[in-house]
Amino acid sequence: MIAIAAVNEKGYIGKGGDLLYSIKEDMRYFASVTREKTLIMGRKTLLSLPGGKGLKGRKNIVLSRSMKKEEAEERGVYLAKDVGEVLSLLTFLGVSEEEAFVIGGGEVYSLLMPYCKTLLLTRVHSFEEGDVSFPEIPADFSLIKGEEKSENGVSFRFDKYVR
Ligand SMILES: NC(=O)c1ccc[n+]([C@@H]2O[C@H](COP(=O)([O-])OP(=O)(O)OC[C@H]3O[C@@H](n4cnc5c(N)ncnc54)[C@H](OP(=O)(O)O)[C@@H]3O)[C@@H](O)[C@H]2O)c1
């Protein structure tokens, strides 16, 4: 699996159920990298997406113990009650490891970190407080730093970690 996230200098990824930043270039990067791929997310992240629905042009798997199957269908997502069901769904859908993107949030990044071989982290050089963090990156990942970029006064970098 591949995890993709925007993380600030304090390790935060979200606040009040929403993202901390709205960087157009990062959104375009996310859209192009995940196009036609399969996304895996937690229920709270699904609810933060436009209309609370799965993203178009991608298969969407939501992890939730509380959501009913009917609701998942209405929201255009496959429902997984635990990690085992995520893995079964990926097999059922014929999705390879490189096509499965973990898109958050904090709980689900932590849960699926052991399955991730690559991390695509947009490092936002900013120090806002948040209430949800990206987990600690295990020591067996090595970092390939991207080039520094900036948009509307916010600077950031597309980093890649590989195991
Ligand atoms: N910066 C970024 O790149 C980025 C990306 C994504 C999200 N975010 C932000 O992250 C925040 C949301 O993250 P979060 O950690 O609060 O929530 P989350 O990971 O999106 O979702 C948590 C939910 O996932 C389900 N879940 C978690 N572990 C599970 C398990 N083992 N089995 C089954 N279901 C499981 C539970 O749903 P039930 O309660 O239904 O059981 C849990 O309440 C928001 O602020 C969002 O904007 C940021």
Image: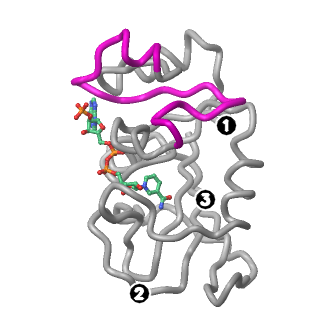
Q: Which residue is mark 2?
A: 127
Residue at image x 37%, y 9%?
A: 70
Secondary structure, mark 2, is loop
Tell me which label, 2 or 3, sits earlier in the chain. Answer: 3
Task: Point out the image quarter for the C terminus.
Answer: bottom right
C-alpha span from label 2 to label 3: 20 Å
Residue at the extreme bottom? 153
Residue 92 x/y as whole percent? 56, 9
Secondary structure, mark 1, is helix
Q: Amino acid at mark 3?
A: Leu
Up/down of 128 relative to 158, above or below: below
Instruction: Kindly identify which numbered label has been placed on residue 98.
Output: 1
Instruction: Kindly identify which numbered label has been placed on residue 120.
Output: 3
Up/down of 15 relative to 42, above or below: below
**Pointer 2 residue Cβ closer than 8 Å to ligand 1:** no
Q: Nearer the viewer, mark 2 or mark 1?
A: 2
Residue at the extreme front? 51
Is residue 63 one of those drawn in magenta?
yes
Residue at image x 53%, y 65%?
A: 6
Please report the bounds of the magenta region as a residue range. 50-74
